[in-house]
């Protein structure tokens, strides 16, 4: 689950990671109040107004703006709240901004230069270990750095038996070219960041930029946090941070019906039990000349209700030209699923796309008979190869 920058920073702060302080606001008036409070608490003359959406690259898209007085705070918050923000990560349609974070300006001039770094903690699946990834080239597109100057990105592997060691934090601070107070502060920053990542059951913490201020403090200016869905049950307070308006509405609905659903761009909707079979079905659809419109795993206990919920979700996608239902009856009996398909079909009415049902396993023959005799426009198959041929046929018709 992704969360907003302001929420990620609150989590970081609770683990002792220094962050650029800020207050979230829904309206330009609230933004002005927030700026006044930041002046009071942190003596911040200038503030930055930062769009809160689940996507990076906001600065480039005009979603991060510096305000030098209260009039500018109001004006810029007014521009950003309600805008459709397009960044390299949102896709062409962009994302609507509902909230801004009004944050203290941390790029103030002082005894030394400010410097931006990149630091993230994530799971390296190939190594089976968490790593701290870091670079002196912070602030900008890390993808760009990875492509053109990969030697400027460093990785520190963490041994799960002992966790992040002091020498590793010092090595990172040293490789980032720091010395004196900033060096010490960076080692603390890295240790606290790693602890936050580990204890929150996260799959990624990406801080870009990590800033060395002109008075040699290290702090997180940005926070991109991804919490592992499978660990969320241990953190009800983080679960409450979910912002459904940022998620695909079809995926939200699917998760409410306990369906594993990922929307894709193709034209054949799939309804399958089991993730492995779902992957294989997507391959078959491609082989048959179609493109899967989604990944949908109805789980091992599919019944008439799950089938109906799945239908409902797939049919909301206007790109869907055919639906392939591929169920292997093990624990679930094929005739029950077939009845579910027939019931859902009748109840939903007006289903405008052909449906191909392939049921294999327990009671497959009975299931095929049920469907063939239902009088509905449903094609049934027992062999996957027959189902694939039917997909090709209905796409051509
Ligand atoms: P992103 O574009 O979505 O990654 O958003 P960031 O939070 O990383 O902010 C983008 C950029 O805004 C940063 O790289 C900074 O250059 C700039 N920025 C952020 N905070 C401040 C600030 O306090 N003062 C100034 N002057 N610039 C800031
Ligand atoms: Mn950033």
Image (cartoon, rainbow, N blue to C red):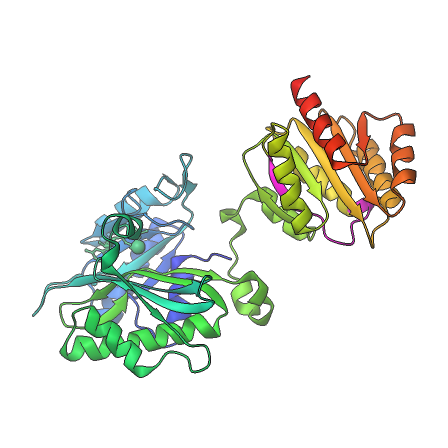
Report the residue at 18% width, 53% height from top: 68
Residue 296 located within the stretch drawn in magenta: yes
Asked if residue 32 is positioned above or below residue 381 in the image, the reply reads: below
Locate residue 155: give its quadrant.
Answer: bottom left
Ligand 1: image quarter:
bottom left
The structure residue drawn at horizontal position 85% and vertical position 39%, both measured from the top left corner, is 338
Which of the two residues, 394 or 376, is positioned nearer the viewer here?
Answer: 394
Residue 144 at x, y percent in the picture: 27, 48
Give left or right: position of 152 versus 297: left
Q: Residue furthest toward the left?
A: 111
| Percent x, y of residue 347 | 82, 34
In the image: residue 321, left or right of residue 173: right
Percent coordinates x, y for residue 238 in the rendering: 52, 66
Q: Number of labelled discs? A: 0
Between 196 and 287, the one lying in front of the other is 287
Q: Residue at x 51, y 57 (%)?
A: 1
Residue 342, picture quadrant: top right
Considering the image in quadrants, where does the C terminus appear?
Answer: top right
**Residue 273 x/y as whole percent:** 73, 48
Which region is colored magenta? 292-305
Q: Is residue 209 magenta?
A: no
Relative to 23, does residue 364 appear above or below in the rendering? above
Tell me if I can see residue 138 in this picture.
no
Residue sitting at x 46%, y 81%:
161
Observer-nearest of 119 and 368: 368
Q: Is residue 309 left or right of residue 153?
A: right
Report if residue 324 is visible in the image. yes
């Amino acid at each position: 689950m992704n969360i907003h920058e302001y929420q990620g920073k609150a989590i970081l702060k609770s683990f002792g990671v220094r962050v650029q302080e800020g207050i979230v606001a829904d309206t330009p008036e609230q933004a002005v109040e927030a700026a006044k409070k930041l002046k009071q608490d942190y003596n911040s003359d200038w503030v930055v107004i930062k769009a809160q959406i689940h996507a990076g690259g906001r600065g480039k898209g005009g979603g991060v703006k510096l305000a030098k007085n209260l009039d500018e705070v109001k004006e810029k918050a007014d521009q950003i709240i309600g805008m459709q923000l397009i960044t390299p990560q949102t896709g062409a349609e962009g994302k609507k901004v509902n909230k801004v974070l009004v944050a203290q300006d941390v790029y103030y001039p002082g005894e030394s230069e400010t410097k931006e770094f990149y630091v993230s903690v994530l799971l390296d699946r190939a190594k089976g270990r968490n790593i701290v990834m870091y670079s002196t080239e912070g602030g900008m597109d890390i993808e760009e750095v990875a492509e053109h100057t990969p030697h400027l990105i460093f990785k520190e592997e963490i041994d799960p038996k002992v966790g992040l060691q002091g020498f590793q934090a010092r090595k990172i601070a040293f490789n980032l070219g720091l010395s004196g107070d900033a060096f010490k502060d960076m080692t603390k920053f890295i240790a606290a960041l790693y602890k936050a990542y580990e204890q929150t059951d996260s799959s990624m913490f990406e801080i870009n930029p990590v800033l060395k201020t002109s008075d040699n403090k290290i702090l997180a200016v940005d926070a991109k946090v991804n919490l592992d869905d499978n660990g969320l049950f241990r953190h009800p307070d983080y679960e409450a941070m979910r912002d459904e308006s940022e998620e695909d509405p079809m995926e939200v609905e699917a998760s409410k019906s306990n369906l594993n659903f990922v929307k894709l761009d193709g034209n054949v909707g799939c309804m399958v039990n089991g993730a492995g079979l779902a992957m294989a079905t997507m391959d078959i659809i491609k082989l048959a000349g179609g493109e899967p419109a989604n990944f949908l795993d109805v789980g091992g206990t599919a019944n008439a209700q799950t089938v109906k919920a799945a239908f409902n979700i797939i049919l909301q996608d206007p790109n869907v030209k055919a639906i392939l239902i591929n169920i292997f009856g093990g624990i679930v009996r094929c005739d029950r699923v077939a009845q579910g398909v027939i019931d859902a079909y009748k109840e939903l009415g007006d289903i405008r796309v052909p449906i191909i049902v392939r049921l294999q396993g327990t009671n497959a023959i009975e299931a095929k008979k049920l469907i063939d005799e239902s009088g509905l426009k449903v094609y049934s198959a027992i062999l996957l190869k027959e189902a694939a041929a039917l997909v090709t046929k209905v796409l051509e018709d």
